[in-house]
Image (cartoon, rainbow, N blue to C red):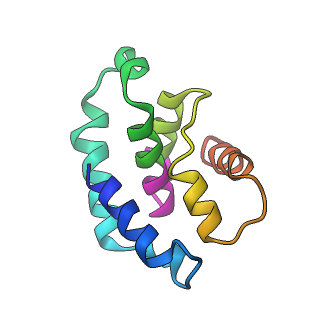
Amino acid sequence: MPLYALMHLYRQKHGDGRGGALQFWQTAQVRHYACHAYDDWFARIPPVEYPWLPLPDLSHLAHALVACGENERAACVFRAMGPYVTRQPWQDINASLGRSSDWRDQFLRIRASVLR
């Protein structure tokens, strides 16, 4: 999935907290790949099959959609994830932004905001 490659590139460029970290995710390239993954993969899967989807893929997709402003699509992915989450990409994003709080707290805050 290209979103994994983008996360790898993000770690290389911003993993140590260098500036521009948030802007990395707000580009046309990220939006293109996030929306493409949603439209051509996730949206084609019947909801009854959501429990069998790979949680790491859903986590990366949810993060990319939120980060590029596609909150409605992200909400669908968060619903498919249910109460579950993977450490990545949330932990690396939290650390690269210099946030002192636990990555799980940030994830829960983001998910709650999107699911309102």
| Residue 75 rendering spot, x and y as whole percentages | 52, 41
**Farthest-out residue, bottom:** 19
Left or right of residue 59: residue 42: left
For the C terminus, give its image quadrant.
top right
- Vertical placement of 16 versus 31: above or below? below
Asked if residue 25 can be seen in this view, the reply is no
Left or right of residue 49: residue 62: right
| Residue 77 rendering spot, x and y as whole percentages | 46, 37
- In this rendered view, identify the residue nearer to me: 62 or 87: 87
The magenta stretch spans residue 96: no
- Vertical placement of 84 versus 46: above or below? below
The magenta stretch spans residue 72: yes
| Residue 2 rendering spot, x and y as whole percentages | 26, 55
Residue at x 57%, y 36% (from the top left corner)? 85
Left or right of residue 59: residue 29: left
| Residue 98 rendering spot, x and y as whole percentages | 69, 72
Bounds of the magenta segment:
63-73
